[in-house]
Amino acid sequence: MSNILVNGLKSKVGGGKIIFDTYLRLLAESEPDDTYFVLTPDRCSYASFESDNIKIIDIPRWAHSNLATLPLYRFIMPNLLNNLGIDAILNFGDIVIPTDVHQVYNFDWAFAVYPNHAIWGKLPLRDKVFFRLKLHFFEAYLRRAAVIMAQTQAMKSRLEARYRLDNVVLVPAAVTVAEASSSKKSVFDLPKGRFKFVYPANYYPHKNIDILERVAAELKARDVDVVIVLTIDPKEHEAAGRFLDRIKCGNLDDVLINVGRVSAEYIPALYQACDALLMPTLLETFGLPYVEAMDHRKPIVTSDMDFAHAVCGEAALYCDPMDPLSILAAMERVWQDEEVRASLVTNGVRRLSAMWDWPRVFAEYQSLVMQGLAGRSPIGEQGVASS
C-alpha cells in the first residue's frame, strides 16, 4: 500500500472547488486500497469523506491564507510529506510543491501563461505584488512536477511554449450538471418578457465584470428588453461593493440584475431562468460555465480568446471583451436571431457529446498517479496524454 497526498487546500470557490469536490466524492466511492491524505479548504465541511483509507488532515489555520502561500509550499508542505511518508501527490493547488516525490499537478492558474496580459495592469497593487512573487515561485518549482495536467489544448500549448516542457498531458475538465428540481425553478425572481443573459462569476479582475457597466448603459439608452444577470457577493471584495453601488447610483440595476452568490445546487435553476450565457472574461484555464451553458441548451457570447475557442468552438459568438460595442453586437445577434441561437445550441450539444465525463477524468487522474508509483513514465502511454 502507498500513501498519497491530495492537495485541495486552495480549492475554495468556482471551478476549482467543483473539480476537487467531485474528485473526492469519486475517490470515496471507489473504496481505495491505498491511503489518501487530503488537504481541504475546510476540514469540517469534508469530514463525511473520511474512512479507513481517506484521512482529512489539518494544517495551521494561518497557512490557509493567500499571504501564507509561499511559506506553505516552501516549508510546510515538504515537512508534511516527510512526516506522512508520502509516496505520490495529486496536486490541485496553485503551484507545484518543491519535492522529489512523484507529483501530478493540475494546472489551474491562467496568469502564469499570460504574463504580459493587460489584466496585470488592472490588479490592485497588493495583488500585483503577490501575483508577481507567486509567478516567480511557480516558475521555480514547475519542473519538480512529474506530470502537469492541462485542461485544454490552448493551455497545454501555452505551458509547453513558455516553459519548454515535455511532460504536459491533456486531461480535460468534466462537468456533470444536475437537473433543477421543480421546487427550485422559481427561486430567481427575474423580469418576465425580457431576454436574460447570465454571467455566473465571482468578482475578480480577470472576470472583467466592470465592462458590463458600459454595456448596461448602452442597453438602457437603446431601451431594449434585455438584462444581464450577475452573481456577485458584495462582501467578497471591496471593489465588488463599489461596483454594485455604482450600478445602483447610475440607475442601471434594472439592466444589471445581481442575484448574489448562487450555491451549486441552484446553478441549474439559474440557467433555466435565463436565455443565454454572457462571459466577457479575460483569463481562464477552462471556464466551467461554458460547459454548463451547453448542457442547459443556452447560446454563448464570450471573449475572442484562445481559451474560449478551445472549449466552445462553434458553440459561441465571440467579441472583443474590452470593447462594449463589440460585446453588444454579439449579444444583439443572439437576442434578435432565433436561428443564430438554435445553431449555437446545436453546436454546443454536439461539442458536449465529445467531452470527457467524470468517470473518465477520475480514471485518468488515478492512472497518472499510479503509473508514477509503479515507476513507469505516464507520458506517451495513452493517446490523450501524448497528444
Image (tube, rainbow, N blue to C red):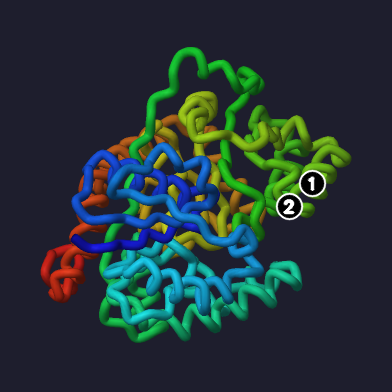
Tag 2's secondary structure? loop
Question: In this rendering, does residue 101 appear at all?
Answer: yes
Identified by mark 1, the residue type is Gly
Return the residue at label 1: 241
Front in this rendered view, residue 101 or 230: 101
Front in this rendered view, residue 329 or 139: 139
Spatial CA distance of label 2 from label 1 is: 7 Å
Determine which quarter of the picture holds residue 181: top left
Q: Are marks 2 and 1 in contact (CB under 8 Å)?
A: yes
Identified by mark 2, the residue type is His
Tag 1's secondary structure? helix
Question: In this rendering, does residue 104 appear at all?
Answer: no
Q: Residues within 10 Å of mark 1 (few under 14, many from 20)?
A: some
Return the residue at label 2: 237
**Which residue shows up at 42% across the image and 50% down it?**
56
Above or below, 74 relative to 266: below
Which residue is at the far right? 249
Of the 4 image quadrants, the one containing the C terminus is bottom left
